[in-house]
Image: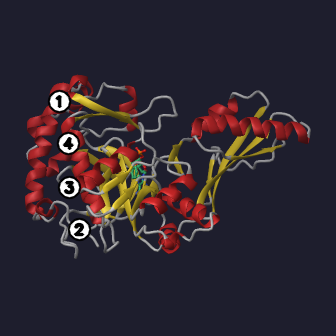
Amino acid sequence: MDHLFNAKMETLQHKKIQELQLERLQKTVHLVYETVPHYQKKFKELGVKPSDIKTLGDIRKLPFTTKDDLRKNAPFGMMTTSLDNCIELHASSGTTGVPVTACYTRNDLEVWSEVMARCLSMSGLTKKDIFQNPIPYGTFTGGFGFHYGAQKVGALVIPSGKGQSERQIKLMEYYGTTFISGVASYAMHLGQVALEMGLDPKRLKVRNGLFGAEMFTPGLKKRIMEVWDMDVHDIYGLTEMCGPGVSTDCDQHDGLHLWEDHFLVECVDPLTLEPVGPEEEGEMVLTTLTKEGMPLLRYRTRDIAKLYDAEVCTCGRTHVRHSMIKGRSDDMVIIRGTNIYPGQIESVLMNNPLVGGNWRMVLTTEHDMDMLTVEVETKQRVSIADMEQLAARLKADIQSVIVFTPRVDVLPPNTILETGLKAKRVIDNRKKD
Ligand code: DLL
C-alpha cells in the first residue's frame, strides 16, 4: 500500500507548487549567477540577467547545462558554496576519466532524504518494515540515497551493499527482510540465486521492492514480481540532481511522480532544444530548485520520456508524472546499472597491439539480465590458441574499466560488416519489454 510521507507537499495544489517553483527558481538563478563563473559567462553570452526571470516560462531564456560543462569544470568548479559547507561527496561512475562530482551541504542531504522517503513510502515502505539495501555504497549515489530515505521513514535498515548474493539471501531469511531496493537487474539475479540455493523467493518475507538506475522494462518488472511475489516500483534519479529520488511510480503504475517542489522539469526535442508538445516524447531537462552545493540550471539528462498533462492522480498526488525512461539520446549505454560509453571500451581495445580497427558491442538479454559481448577483430590472422589468449586478456582489461565481465569474441580481420558512413559500435538487441 502506497503512503504519503509528506501529505501537505505531495498533495499541494498545482498552482501553489508553481508559485513555490518560481520563488525557488529566482533564488537559484541569483545564486548561480553570483557564485559560478561558468554561469556568469553563459548569462552574458545570452544577454540575460537574473532579474529577467519573472515567470516560470522565462526559464527558456536560461542556458542549458550539459555533462560536458560539468566535466570541464570538474570537480568543484560548478559549486556555489565552499567545501567547508559540504559534508558528503558523490560521483557518477567516472570510468571515462572525469567523473561528475556532486557535493552535498547538510541541507542537500536533508532534501535528498526527504525525496527518497517520499519515493519509498510511495512504494509501500513503513516504519514496520525491515529494509535491505543490496546496492553499492560508495561514491555511487544508490546506496546512501536509499539508506537515508529508509531511515527517514523509520524502517529498520540492513546496509547489506551489493554483491555476495548468497549472503544477501541468507540475510533476508535470517532477519525476515520485507522490503528490498536496488538496481533492477540485480533484483532478478538475486531471485535466481535464491532458487539455485533451493529456496523459493516467494517463501521469503520480501513483499515490496523499489528499483531503478537503469532501463527497467515492464517485462523485467513482471518477472521480478512473479519470482518474488512482491510489488515492484520504479525509481528514477541521477547524480547531478541528488541521485535516486527524483521520481517514482505510485500504486497506479502509470507514470512516475516527479517532486516538483525540488526539481523543475521540461521536456525538449534533443535536436532543436525546443519544448515538445503535450504528452510528446522528448529529453527531460531538469533544474534544481533547492540545491545548495551544486545547483544546476536546465540540466540535459539525455533521458527520453514524456510528461503527462498535470492533473491530480487517483493516488491524490499533484506532482507531474513522466513515463518510464525509454532510453538515452546520446550513445551511452547502461548495462546492469553501470554507465558504459563505447569510448571506454575502445580505449582498452586500442591499447592492445594485436587488435584491429573494427569492433562492436552487442547487447542481449539472457535470463532477463543484460549481457555484453564485445566482438573484436585481430589486426592479422593468428592461430586459434592466440585468439583465445587475446580474448582472455581483453576480457580482463575491459572488466577492469566497466566493473563486470563481458564476453569477448575475437574474430579474424574483416569479419565485422561495416554499415553506413560511421561505424556502428553499439548493437542493442536487448529485449524491450
Ligand atoms: O543511477 C541514480 C539511481 C540509483 C537511480 C539507484 C535509481 C536507483 P547515475 O549513476 O548518475 O545515477 O545514473 C543516472 O541512470 O540519467 C538514467 O539514464 C539512468 N536511470 C536512473 N534511473 C532510471 C530508471 C543513478 N528508473 C542515469 N529508469 C539516468 C531508466 C534510469 N533509467
Residue at the disc numbered 3: 260
Q: Is 118 positioned to the left or the right of 390 in the image?
A: left
Name which of mark 2 and mark 1 comes first in the sequence. 2
Q: From the image, tell me which residue sits under label 4.
A: 61
- The answer to whether residue 188 is above or below residue 35 is below
Q: Amino acid at mark 1?
A: Tyr
Residue 83 placement: quadrant: top left
The colour scheme of the drawn protein is secondary structure
Foreground mark, 2 or 1, reads 2
Q: Position of residue 29 (x, y in %)?
A: 16, 37
| Image quadrant occupied by the N terminus | bottom left
Q: Residue at left 16%, top 51%?
A: 57
Secondary structure beneath disc 4? helix
Q: Which residue is mark 1?
A: 33
Whole-angstrom CA distance, mark 2 to mark 1, is: 39 Å
The amino acid type found where label 4 is placed reads Lys
Residue drawn at x 36%, y 26% as measured from the top left: 75
- Among the two numbered marks 2 and 4 on one chain, the one whose residue lies closer to the N terminus: 2
Left or right, 169 with reference to 364:
left
Q: Is mark 1 within 8 Å of ligand 1?
A: no
Residue sitting nearer the eye, 209 or 294 = 209
Vertical comparison of 241 with 78: above or below? below
Chain-order first, disc 2 or disc 3: 2
10 Å crowding of disc 2: few (<14), some (14-19), many (20+): some
